[in-house]
Image (cartoon, grey):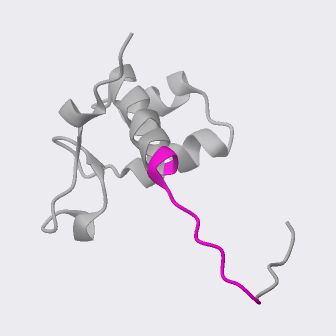
Amino acid sequence: MINKYEDRIIVDPEIMVGKPIIKGTRITVELVLGLLAQGERMDEILEAYPHLKREDIYAALGYAEKIIREERIMPLSGIKCAQL
């Protein structure tokens, strides 16, 4: 299945200060990803936010994947970075 997040994720400066949200809601991609990162199961998220659909959660993941895929790291010469 091809994830067409573009149909479900919007960025509007007038809604949630321009953070990416699930279309038709005020639920941010950040919130959905945070819940998943904390170990919430998809069914739990859908129960807590009944106006969300499973496809919305997949769209949030697809959006995050696109952002990370397009991220470019530019090394700064002469600066040592702390290791995680």
Point out residue 26 in the picture as x, y percentages from the top left corner: 25, 52
Q: Quadrant of residue 9?
A: top left
Q: Residue furthest right?
A: 83
In the figure, 7 relative to 83: above or below? above
Q: Residue at x 84, y 77 (%)?
A: 82
Q: Where's the N terminus, which quadrant?
A: top left
Left or right placement of residue 22 versus residue 32 in this view = left
Left or right placement of residue 13 versus residue 84 in this view = left
In the figure, 70 relative to 46: above or below? below
Q: Residue furthest bottom?
A: 78
Q: Residue at x 56, y 44 (%)?
A: 35
Residue 73 lies in the magenta-colored region: yes
Count the marks: how many? 0
State the extent of the magenta-drawn residues as a range: 68-78
Point out residue 63 in the picture as x, y percentages from the top left corner: 39, 41
Q: Residue at x 34, y 30 (%)?
A: 56
Point out residue 71 in the picture as x, y percentages from the top left corner: 49, 56
In the figure, 81 relative to 36: above or below? below
Q: Nearer the viewer, residue 48 or 31?
A: 31
